[in-house]
């Protein structure tokens, strides 16, 4: 039992901005790979088509990301390092229709609160680049540099040594950073990426098609045993590649799902794919796939967690069915599974027994899928314990589920 706290009580007081940013950094910047993710998303939002990632000592000593995007005007550079400042949304309507990867206006301020940050940027109409270091209180100074932006992050957690103690080895942290780069590179084959560590080039991908980019990242085994998926059903389009059962793996590290270009982990999507493979993949094997789902941003909520890796669909049941049937039809084209018709919906996996958290009334857009739309949904991926509506499906969708693009 803890001893009573005998210290005199402290008065309620407002926290200083620096401490607020450091607290926020605990959620947003968990490790070096989180910095890489936030900066890469900013670079893509800024319109970058050539992105270079340079890391030192697993990203702890240095993370430097350069893009050839629109750049940041010098008068806006202090705001880029300020909390809750962004060019991507300005109203609730913007938040409910997010079309960018970033939108919270927290990342750069959080990074700057636990590391030494320097931003060098140049816009197309500027005679030279500008540079700002430290925080939003600094003043931009003239600098040299090409069109675009370079964000240089040094000595991560230098002022919060307790956080450094929780980091793993240099190679482990680099592995997490490299996985983030590969994950984002898969989503944008129209952008070239390069990754170096301690001065050595590790990966480089030129602009290409998704077929070539996925082969480069997932390997020859996947490239030689994959099926193309491309279906549009009402407001939903699912496309990409799924691996044949022969390309399955002992771990689920070959599964990449994107919603409007954003990598996500979502129980509805994972279960839909798993259910489609259930008749052709047995044991403890996991299918490999690179799938993208495009839909109206108003039909999916990405403001679920600061990491922006979880989403909540307005109608998770319709999304589940779209994905399930698209994958099932692709698998049915192979000689091993062709039975003359698409397999019927399969029972939910017992392992997915989490209860969904529903935070509002679900509005179905299923009727938009087809004029003769009928609720022929497969069982819930959440099991019998989840909240249900009158049709026997879960009451909600997934529960996890001017500054040039920067902030």
Image: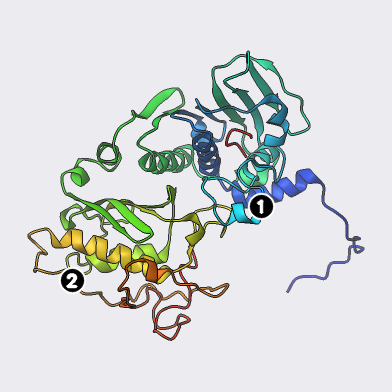
Kind of element beneath mark 1? loop
Of marks 2 and 1, the one in the foreground? 1
Q: Position of residue 328 (x, y in %)?
A: 21, 64
| Sequence-earlier tag: 2 or 1 | 1
Q: Residue 13: name its quadrant.
A: bottom right
Q: Position of residue 137 (x, y in %)?
A: 78, 32
12 or 299: nearer the viewer: 299
Q: Which residue is mark 1?
A: 91
In the shown orientation, is residue 222 left or right of residue 362? left
Q: Give the residue drawn at x 28%, y 52%.
A: 289
- Figure check: 134 above or below 340: above
Label 1 neighbour load within 10 Å: few <14, some 14-19, many 20+: few
Q: Residue 155: name its quadrant.
A: top right
296 or 22: nearer the viewer: 296
Q: Quadrant of the N terminus?
A: bottom right
Q: Are marks 2 and 1 in contact (CB under 8 Å)?
A: no
Label 2 neighbour load within 10 Å: few <14, some 14-19, many 20+: some
Q: Quadrant of the C terminus?
A: top right
Q: Which residue is mark 2?
A: 343
13 or 367: nearer the viewer: 367
- Figure check: 407 above or below 331: above
Q: Residue 322: name its quadrant.
A: bottom left
In the shown orientation, is residue 94 left or right of residue 363? right
Kind of element beneath mark 2? loop
């Amino acid at each position: 039992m803890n001893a009573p706290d005998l210290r005199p009580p402290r008065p309620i007081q407002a926290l200083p901005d620096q401490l607020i940013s450091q607290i926020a950094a605990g959620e947003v910047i968990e490790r070096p790979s989180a910095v890489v993710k936030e900066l890469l998303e900013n670079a893509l939002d800024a319109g970058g088509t050539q992105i270079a990632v340079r890391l030192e000592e697993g990203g702890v000593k240095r993370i430097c990301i350069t893009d050839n995007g629109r750049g940041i005007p010098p008068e806006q550079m202090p705001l880029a390092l300020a909390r809750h400042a962004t060019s991507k949304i300005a109203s609730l309507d913007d938040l409910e229709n997010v079309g960018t990867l970033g939108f919270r206006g927290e990342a750069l301020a959080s990074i700057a609160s636990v590391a030494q940050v320097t931003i060098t940027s140049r816009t197309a109409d500027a005679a030279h680049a500008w540079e700002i270091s430290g925080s939003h209180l600094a003043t931009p100074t003239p600098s040299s540099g090409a069109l675009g932006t370079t964000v240089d992050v040094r000595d991560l957690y230098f002022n919060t040594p307790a956080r450094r103690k929780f980091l793993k080895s240099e190679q482990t942290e680099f592995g997490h950073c490299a996985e983030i780069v590969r994950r984002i590179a898969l989503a944008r084959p129209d952008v070239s990426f390069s990754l170096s560590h301690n001065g050595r080039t590790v990966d480089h991908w030129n602009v290409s098609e998704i077929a070539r980019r996925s082969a480069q990242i997932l390997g020859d085994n996947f490239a030689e045993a994959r099926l193309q998926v491309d279906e549009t059903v009402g407001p939903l389009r699912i496309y990409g590649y799924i691996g044949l059962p022969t390309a399955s793996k002992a771990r689920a590290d070959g599964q990449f799902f994107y919603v409007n270009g954003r990598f996500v982990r979502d129980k509805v999507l994972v279960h839909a794919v798993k259910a489609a493979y259930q008749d052709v993949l047995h044991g403890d094997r996991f299918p490999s796939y690179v799938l993208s789902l495009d839909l109206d941003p108003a039909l999916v909520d990405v403001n679920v967690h600061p990491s922006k890796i979880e989403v909540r669909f307005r109608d998770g049941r319709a999304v589940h069915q779209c994905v399930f049937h698209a994958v099932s039809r692709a698998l049915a084209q192979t000689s091993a599974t062709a039975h003359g018709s698409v397999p019927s919906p399969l029972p939910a996996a017992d392992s997915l027994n989490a209860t969904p958290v529903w935070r509002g009334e679900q509005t179905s857009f299923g009727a938009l899928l087809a004029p003769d739309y009928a609720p022929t949904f497969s069982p819930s991926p959440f099991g019998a314990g989840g909240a249900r509506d009158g049709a026997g499906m879960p009451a909600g969708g997934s529960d996890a589920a001017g500054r040039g693009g920067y902030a």
